[in-house]
Structure formats: C-alpha cells, structure tokens
Amino acid sequence: MENKKTKLTISGNQKKSFKDFSSSKTQGKKTVLIEKKSSRPITKGNFNKSSSSKSSPNFSRSPSSKPYNPSKTSIATSDFERRKLAEQRATKKIKNDSDGDKKTKIGTNKRQVKLTVSRALSDEIETRERSLASVKRARQKELKNVNKEDDKENLKPVKRDINIPEAITVRELANRMAEQSSNVIKFLFGMGVTVTINQTLAADTAEYLVKEFGHNPIREEKTEEIIKKIKATRVENLKNRPPIVTVMGHVDHGKTSVLDVLRSANVVSGEFGGITQHIGAYQIESQSNKLTFIDTPGHAAFTEMRARGSKLTDVVVLVVAADDGVKPQTVESIKHAKAAKVPIVVAINKCDLPEADPQKIKNQLLEYELIAEDLSGDTLMVEISAKTKLNLDKLVEAIILQAEILDLKTDFDSKATGIVLESKIDVGRGPVATIIVTTGTLKKGDFFVSGFRWGKIRAIINDKGININEALPSTPVEILGINGASKAGDDFLVLDSEKEAKSLSESRAQESKDGKNPLTFATQDSAFSDKSVDELNLIVKSDVHGSSEAIKNAISQIKHDEVKPKIILADIGMVTETDVTLAKASNAVLIAFNVKPSKEAKKLAEIEKIKISSYNIIYEVLDYIKQKMSGLLSPDVKETIIGSAQILEIFKVSGAGKVAGSKIIEGEINSTSDVRIIRDGTIIYTGKVGTLFREKNQVKQVSNGQECGITVKDYLDFKKNDTIEAFNVTSTERSI
C-alpha cells in the first residue's frame, strides 16, 4: 500500500517539500501538510478524485474576509458563550475562504485532518471549527454543573420541630425526623446502646437524638395532664345536677324489683334466671327531682361491676331482704361503698313477709358500722316492700335528702365527660356504649375518646329508647359512633376535633403498650411445676363487656392441681366463622353467653364438628366449664389383689401351648382376672388369664388350696417357683 503525501501552500507560493519546511517557516510562509492513507490500492483514475474530495479546509484569511476585532464584540459572560462565538467566527471564515478560492476547496471532515506543527503554532488554531458532538458535550457538562449547584442548595439539612411523647419507638422517631431508621440505630450503636427498630425509647433519650440530628425537640404533654385539663371545671358555671344512685346488695334481695316499681317497668322478666347480669341505668323523676339509678348484679361473679358502680355513684342504696339478713354480697357492697367514701341508704326489703324481721337486719348491720337513726346513728334505713310498694316514697325522700346534703353541682357548659357503664356490639348498629355523663353537655356530632377508642357521636339514645340531640349531666344514654367496643369502666372525654381525638387515643394505646413489661422471669419451681398440668382452652363470646369481664373473673377462680382453664379469647358479639376456626385449631371449648352464632358459623361448626355451647345464666357456664375440666382429670384407679398361685410344674398341652401347673396359695383366681408374673420379687410380666384348667377341664374359677393349670395371654416363659398374682382394677371418675 502506498502512502501519498499532498502538499498544500495556502499563501499561493510555489510548493515545497517537507525538507524545506524550516526554511519556509523562516520566510513567513504558512504551509499545511496533509497525510492521507488509502485503505485500498490506488488506481489510475481515483487519485485525482480522492484528492479533490478529501482536501483539508483553507484556514488562511481570504482577501474578502474582514479582520477580527475583539474590541467590537461584547464580552462573553461564560465559557459556553465564548465557545459559541468562536464557532460562529470559524464558520464564517470557512465560508468566506470557500467563496474566494473554490479551486482549493477542501472537505469538511475535520476528523481526518491531522494537526501539523505549523498549525499548532499558528494563531488561527483558536478559531478552528468544532464538531457538533463536542458542542453537545460542552452543553451537557454546563447543564450538569448547574444541576449540581441546584442539588447542593436543595440538599441543605431541613430543621424540623419534632413532637416527643413520653415513650416513642425508634421507627416512629425516625419517621418524625424524616431520617432512615438504620441511621438512628447506627447512632445509638455508636453510643454503646443496642436497639431494634421497634424498641421503645424514653422521652429524654429521644430528645437527645433529635438534637443530635439537627432538629428542634418539643416535649408533648402527658396524656394524664391533657385529661386533667379537659376535666377541669369552671367554678363560675356550676349548677345543681341530679344525684347518681347505685342500688347494691345480695343476689335475689329485690334490687331490680325496687327499681321496677320506681320506673314502672318490668326489667326482671327480661333477665334470664331472674338475676341481673348487666349494669342497667335509668333516670326517674319524683317530686320534681330527677334521680339517676344504676342497678348492679348481686351474683358473686360480678364483683367488678359492683366496684365500678360504687366509684361512679353519689349515693348507694343497700337493699337487704328482711327475711334473709346480711349475706356475703351485702358485706362486699358495704366495703365497696366505704372504699368510695359514698353515703349509704339502707332499704330493708320484703317487710310484707310474715318471717320478716327488720330489727334483726339493723342489729346485723351494727357489725359493719352502719347504725340506724333510731339507734342514735346517722345511717338512713327505710323498711320497704317492692311487692306492695310500701314506703317507696320514703326511700326516694331519703335519697333526695342525702343528695341535698352533698350539694351536687357541676359545669353544664364545658365539654362533656363521663364513664362507660357497659359496651356491646349490636348486629344492626355496630359498637354501642352505655355511658353516664358526669360533667358538661354531650351533643350529637361531638368527637370523643373512650379508653383506647375514639369516634364521633352519630346518635344519642336515652333510657326510654328515644333519640335525643343532647344529654345533660347525670344522664344515662347509649351512644353510637365509636370505632370499636370500649371497655366498661373507661372514661369518656369530648374533644374539639377528630385529629385531637385520634391523637389522644393513639397516645393512650402507645403508653399502655410501653407500660407493659414483656419480659417474664421464671423461677426454678415455676419452670417445672406446670409440666404435668393439663389446660382446658376456652373461647367465650358474650353480649356485653361486663358479662365477659365477669365470666373471665369467675373462671380464674377455678383452681385445681392437675387441670386449669385457659381463656384464649374473650370478646363480645355473635359467634363468627373465625371463632369456630380458632376453636378447631386450638382444640378449645366454644361458649356463647347471651349471643347466637351466625348462619355461616353454625354451618362451619357442623362441618368441623365443633360444639357451640349456648348459655344465658352465668353459673350454668361455670358448671359446664367445671364439667369439662373434670373430663381432663385422670380417674382414681384402685387395685385389689384377689389371689395368688405358685408354679409347681410346666406342661405342654396341644392346642394350649405351655401350661403352668400351679397351686392356689391365697384367695382365688378367675378366668377374667388380670395377673402378673413375679420372679424373685420382680414383676416379669403383666397380662390377663388365658385359660384355667382343673383336671383337664376348663373352669372359670379356682379357689384356695386347689391345683390347676394356668395359661397367660401372650406369655410362655414360665419357670418353676414363679408366682402368679391375680388382681382387679377399678377406676372412679373424679370431678372438680
């Protein structure tokens, strides 16, 4: 392949060789040397063609081109603009050169033009044309630099105000700071503290972390402090309110019957078994005075309900049957009332009965420091009869008198507060809570918090089943709009907005979660004590929260060394498919108290063969659980020795195998007896008698002193002098 060198003299002087390059330079002539390597053999006709089409551009000034005067050009403000101006000038020069000297026109493919020494030393190198690709790259670089500067401005740390509660998890703190949880964990790890993403941090630790990450910490008020502010009453708005009266006493002493007469309703007929199993709240008007009554159950299982009623009440009416006297629940009610520091009015009921002895009741109450007025005491005692309505008006007068002494006042204009008496899940209405308003006025549309629940009042229903728009203090009502079944005994607080209600509810739930210690430490005794204890798994669904609470407390009182009840679920509402599935998975007993299973649950229970036990009376539930627990107890096994024989000789009998020729030395042996083979004081085998022979005849029994042949089922290894001991086993079922 031949390399061709083409010499081009831009000034128009005669052509010179490369050897004369130095001399040309000294003479002020500008020469461009272009080397072209052909990739194919050069033929006779293609040299001129290639040389004419692939010529280098003419960089010399043409006569027509004007000299460049930098002073007449505006100063470029950036590198990019300077480069652009240079491109424009180079393009213009090339155009002018091509017009002036078309014979020396060269190609525009700048990639194939090599830079010579003369061009490198030339002043026109500054004005040479640039490729479009280089211009594009320059623009991209410029844009990239601008974006970097903008990013630097945007990446400046943002200082935030971070609300810090008393306890907060690492995840939540990182979210509030808009930081990655891993960064927070790494920082704590660097301080020597090992935590997980769900670990709870104290307020002081969280505050320190917030400062270290460049934010502004703001300590939130404790939930208790917020609630105190909400409950704070204004003295200037105090008005008289109706008294809240709780009726307490032993079961079947006539508490509900007294209330029935006062409000002219028959509630007892609606209670299963004739006993009250729910807290009922009613408001009556007597002698132009409103009275709010709370009826509590008297059954032993409802201790929590009675305690809750005593805390809420202003006056306690203790109902004692004149024919029965002071009973355990009567004593318990007195203790609850005294613990709550509430005045007691004693109603001695059933005074119409011939065996009634009111004076005996007064004497019995002296033991508990309840002294009647006729005995120089300060406790009001009224002899009444719910059946004949005897002295019921005097009972009301005694209650009003106690209320006047107490001078009950509250703020009617503040935000409403109250206590949840009962809660349930109604099929058609959803979660329903029975509350008593203690302060303020409850209005429809109010946002509220109850325990861990919150909601908006959708409806207010009074004790007569009438929808009302507002409830004044001391009024018992049912409310709709809560986001779940609240717990009986929880407080009730009205807030300004949905956001406040939701925030307070979440704070309470978080504090309750943080307050629980998940770590449990087992002692050496406890680690091994429960190994042999069987558990009866229970699933309890009830109509209201109070009943569920009472059943749980009653079940926890059932104690036994070998078996114990374990409640895996206690909830309110009807039995659902989920409950049935859980019962099957955990092998649990499913109990429905005052509720019915859904159609789907009933169908699934039939398919899975899960029994749903429905009850309406609490002590029937407890009896059923005890029965189920008794079934898990191992029976009492009693063993009685009825006789023994000594093997004297061993025989082989066709059809019977080895037969032990023996003599009965004590008692008797039957053909159905259990026997054990004893050799040298050690039990070798335990089984049943196969056949008894007596003089080659099969017999059913062999008595003391007789000789016989004995076979034992599945045993043939008899030896002389072995002892065959016969015994009977009897088992007796145990119950709790």
Image: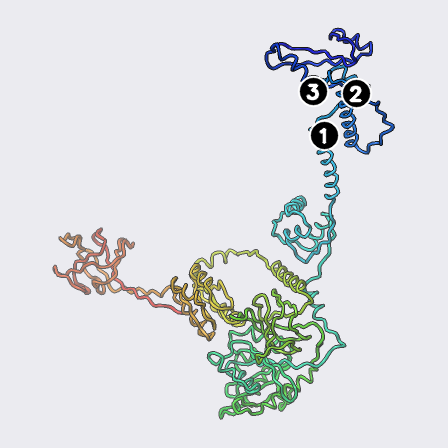
| Alpha carbon separation for disc pair 3 and 1 | 20 Å
The tally of labels here is 3
Q: Which mark is residue 356?
A: none
Image quadrant holding the C terminus, namely: bottom left
Q: Position of residue 353 (x, y in %)?
A: 50, 91
Disc 3 residue type (three-letter): Gly
Instruction: Please rate how many residues cluster around mark 3, counting C-alpha atoms within 10 Å: few if below 14, some from 14 to 19, many from 20.
Output: some
Q: State the image coordinates of residue 266 (x, y, percent, origin top left).
A: 52, 84
Amino acid under label 2? Glu
- The mark closer to the camera, 3 or 1, is 3
The quarter holding residue 152 reads: top right
Horizontally, residue 206 falls left or right of residue 365, namely right
Left or right of residue 635, residue 551 in this image: right
Q: Residue at x 71, y 73 (%)?
A: 414
Q: Quadrant of the N terminus?
A: top right
Q: Earlier in the sequence, mark 3 or mark 1?
A: 3
Q: Which residue is mark 2?
A: 124
Residue carrying label 1: 135
- Amino acid under disc 1: Val
CA separation in Å, label 2 and label 1: 19 Å
Q: Is residue 489 above or below residue 96?
A: below
- Residue 145 is left or right of residue 671, and the answer is right
Mark 2–mark 1 CB contact (< 8 Å): no
- The secondary structure type at the circle numbered 3 is loop
Q: Answer with mark 2 or mark 1, whichever residue precedes in sequence.
A: 2
Instruction: In the displayed orientation, state which residue is furthest to the left.
Output: 696
Disc 3 marks which residue? 107
In which quarter of the view is residue 146 placed? top right
Does residue 299 appear anywhere in the picture?
Answer: yes
For mark 2, give the secondary structure: helix
